Amino acid sequence: MSTKTRMSRRQFAKGTVATAALAATGVLTRLPKVHAADPIELVHWSWLSASDAEVWTQMIQNFNDAHKDKGVQIKMETVPDDQYETKVLAAAASGQAPDFGWGTAGLHAQWAQDGVIVPLDDLSKQVGLDLADFSEFSINSSRYPKYDNKLFMIPMDLMTIQPEVNLDHVKEAGLDPNQPPGVQLSDVVPGGAAQKAGLKGGDRIIRVGTVEIRGINDLMFVLQSGKPGTEVKITFVRDGKEQTVTATFGMPRGKR
């Protein structure tokens, strides 16, 4: 009788085979059995920079230190963000893709179709990763509904945008610091989700669900992350008055 051990995401990130399961932008290879005289080197490509790179580099080093006598090490290579996709595709085509890398949820449906990235459902089960340890939002964002809703990423990082402003300058500009600028719609797609919800050109979106919309990046992130078919409250300003409507998330362009 065998006993299956449940793992948290922190334990998962420290595991040997689990590290390969972080692959989101490279082709996973089947790992051979580990022998002391035949150590495994996992190649990892990262496009992180600045303080993010410093923290991630230290995490990789911590893994290598903890596994130096266990037959597995990670070789991390930094690839500039503006070259990352091109190099991954070229490497995959030549059979030289990294074992795992960094990716952004919802942007690589084509890679899933072409086999550049592979489903991680079976592998996550093999290593005992408990998906219940993650939020439903992050797991859903790691799946591609068009491809059997399979898991193609393991959530590792959630970005929040919190700009710092000079309140004196904000007031001088005639803005209310307690009312984020939001995003004004120039128009809406006929028959689209926005129009069906009652939005129209000129409306200024200030909140989607619980997310404050300060600019276009906030809005695009929410739209890309929403689970198709689910409803969300959209708060907007029209003619100086705040209103709320309910909209239904459609399929993001990158996942169609």
Image (cartoon, grey):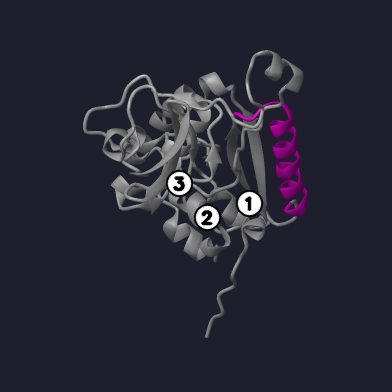
Q: CA distance from mark 3 to mark 1?
A: 37 Å
Locate the C terminus and report the quarter of the image it occupies: top left
Indicate left or right for 38 with 247 as reference.
right
Residue type, label 1: Asp
Indicate left or right for 11 with 106 as reference.
right
The residue range painted magenta reads 47-67
Residue type, label 3: Ser
Say which quarter of the image contains residue 179.
top right
Query: Dot 3, how many residues are within 10 Å of its Cα: few (below 14), some (14-19), or many (20+)?
Result: many
Disc 3 and disc 2 in contact, CB within 8 angstroms: no
Indicate left or right for 19 with 167 as reference.
left
Residue picked out by circle 2:
32
Q: Specify whether residue 51 is painted magenta.
A: yes
Note whether 87 is above or below 44 in the view shown: above
Note whether 35 is above or below 24 in the view shown: below
> Please, what is the dominant secondary structure of the magenta stretch?
helix
The tag on residue 66 is: none
Label 1 vs 2, first from the N-terminus:
2
Residue type, label 2: Pro
Mark 3 or 2, which is nearer the eye? 3
Q: Secondary structure at mark 3?
A: helix
The front one of 184 and 121 is: 184
The front one of 27 and 190 is: 190
Mark 3 or 1, which is nearer the eye? 3
Q: Is residue 142 visible?
A: no
Query: Dot 1, how many residues are within 10 Å of its Cα: few (below 14), some (14-19), or many (20+)?
Result: few
Q: Secondary structure at mark 1?
A: loop
Query: Dot 2, how many residues are within 10 Å of its Cα: few (below 14), some (14-19), or many (20+)?
Result: few
Residue picked out by circle 1:
38
Residue picked out by circle 3:
141
* Residue 80 x/y as whole percent: 59, 21
Disc 1 and disc 2 in contact, CB within 8 angstroms: yes
